[in-house]
Amino acid sequence: MKIAYVMCVFLIGLVSTFDVYMSVMYNSYLFDMEENFIAKHIIATYGVGEFIMVKSFMTIFVVIILTLLVETKYRVSVVWVTIFQLFLFIYLNSSFDCRWFNNSDHPDAFPIQQLIQYCEKLQI
């Protein structure tokens, strides 16, 4: 059972990393696209680079905390964060269309599809 919680933590980290990837790839549009008012404030005050740095460090921090929680009676919180992250992943890929930015009619213009195609080109 513990391995299931660890896999949930891995999935949480993966989705968070994808979110950071999106921030890096579309950094010139990030302020206009960002819906979180705290994130908008960080971008407006400190810039996109610092926002991405904060986002990355917070991802690492959350993954460490959740990994520690797997060993406690509060491990159910890992499941709730996993569910939230899955909804975030779906939202990022269903509400965001890369064709807005590159004027492409290519059907694979959504973020996860572009990432997969990029990795295939690199033969990862």
Image (cartoon, grey):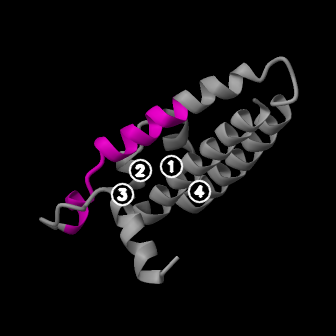
Q: What residue did someone put label 3 on?
A: 111
Query: Would you say residue 45 is visible in this rendering?
Result: no
Q: What is the three-letter code of the residue carrying label 3?
A: Pro
Q: Nearer the viewer, residue 27 or 92?
A: 92
What is the secondary structure assignment of the residue under circle 2?
helix
Residue 44 disc label: 1
Residue 79 disc label: none
Left or right: 42 with respect to 1? left
* Range of magenta residues: 84-102
Binning the other alpha carbons within 10 Å of mark 2 as few (below 14), some (14 to 19) or many (20 upward) gives some
Q: Earlier in the sequence, mark 4 or mark 1?
A: 1
Left or right: 81 with respect to 95? right
Q: What is the three-letter code of the residue carrying label 1?
A: Ala
Closer to the eye: label 1 or 2: 2
Residue drawn 39% across and 57% down? 112
Q: Position of residue 24 (x, y in %)?
A: 49, 63
Closer to the eye: label 2 or 4: 4
Q: Position of residue 117 (x, y in %)?
A: 36, 71
Q: What residue did someone put label 4 on?
A: 52
Q: Nearer the viewer, residue 12 or 50?
A: 12
Q: What residue did someone put label 2 on?
A: 31
